[in-house]
Image (cartoon, coloured by chain):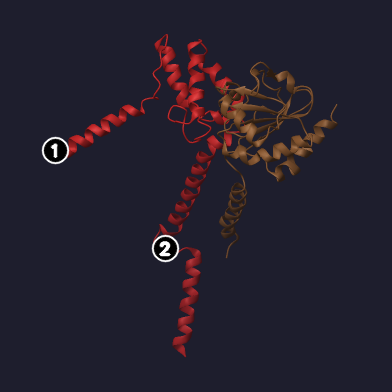
Chain colours: A red, B brown
Amino acid sequence: MMLRTLTIALLLGLSLGAQAGNVEPREFDSREQEENYQELIEELRCLVCMNQNIADSNAELAQDLRRETYKMVRAGKSKDEITDFMVDRYGDFVMYSPPVKSTTILLWTGPFILMFAGVFIAFRQVRKNAASHGSDELSNEEQERLRSILAEREGEEKK
Amino acid sequence: MSKRALIPLGIFLLLVLLLGRGLYLDPRKLDSVLIDKPVPVFDLATVNNPETRLTNKDLSKDVSMFNVWASWCVSCRQEHPILVELSRHKLVPIYGLNYKDTRKEATGWLDKLGDPYIASAFDEDGRVGIDFGVYGVPETFVVDKKGIIRYKHVGPIDPNSWKETLLPIIEKLRAEQ
């Protein structure tokens, strides 16, 4: 039992190491360069495996783009310059987080708008229900119905 | 039944239209951001002859097609007979970008299946492909007389795409000044 727990713990621990960036060992001139590189490869999308960033993807294009990113980082290019380089060639889609532009504003705000609309409608419904059923008295409509039902039954009983 | 009950139905029908349209779209086909931009600058040796070179300037003379291909690419084999036919009938000049291949395998492939290209640039490490925004082979660019990219076709060219999309675009570009 103990041995099994230890084995699982060991395997999990080893697999954590495999997630940290990618396989190629890279050298950098500064801590900042290294951070920029890591951030960039996590922000750029792999266009072959489109739901991965190039940090995680094993596709050849991802390797090529990591290589280019590395070369540019070592050459002293800023994160913005490198992102522009990629977007100039592959479009906004290469950015894993789409930029907030006039074309993407609906994408970013849509879920929030829908959520607030939903909450607003639900709120109104609850308020309306509370208003008519909150009191122990019957609403006007319900009083009318009660009167007509009672009148019918009276009519039947008299027969 | 009150009219308010029709609102969810209306929203549902709208969703049906939207999602139905989506079923016919291919998310893997990205629009090229190079449309209406000049062909990226490049200067590579040709596949068949390391002494000759193919550059972006060669694509600025006539309306042409620039086809990205590789011997390891199965879809390229699929479209290849069409390219060979087009070049046989001289319908449009076709230049090639041999992407991430070896000379030996690339030339062997062309010898076996036919060579439709006026010349093919040898892009061994794919660096020029990156400048063209290549993300999957085959891809074909239609370039106008001034060397501006006007259209990109992702995936193999099939007879339908040629007849209904590519040929009309090429004819339109030829008619331009």
Q: Could you tell me which quadrant the C terminus of chain B lies in?
A: top right
Res A137 label? 2
Q: Amino acid at mark 2?
A: Glu
Q: Is residue B6 above or below residue B163?
A: below
Give the structural element (helix, strand or loop) at label 2.
Answer: loop
Which residue appears at 56% of the width and 56% of the height? B8
User: CA–CA distance between discs 2 and 1?
Assistant: 67 Å
Q: Quick one: B104 or B102, which is closer to the camera?
A: B104
Quarter occupied by the N terminus of chain B: bottom right
Would residue B142 appear left or right of A48 to someone viewing this image? right
Please give the label number shown on residue A2. 1
Residue drawn at (39%, 61%) of the image: A136
Q: Between residues B94 and B60, which one lies in front from this camera angle?
A: B94
Label 1 element class: helix
* Percent position of residue B114, x then y: 67, 35
Nearest the viewer among A74 and A23 is A23
- The numbered dot on residue A80 is none
Residue drawn at x 68%, y 40% as measured from the top left: B81
Mark sitting earlier along the chain (2/1):
1
Give residue B29's position: percent from left, percent from top: 60, 38
Quadrant assignment, res B123: top right
Chain bearing mark 1: A
Return the x and y of residue A82 as percentages of the image width and height.
54, 18
Q: Is residue A41 left or right of residue B100?
A: left
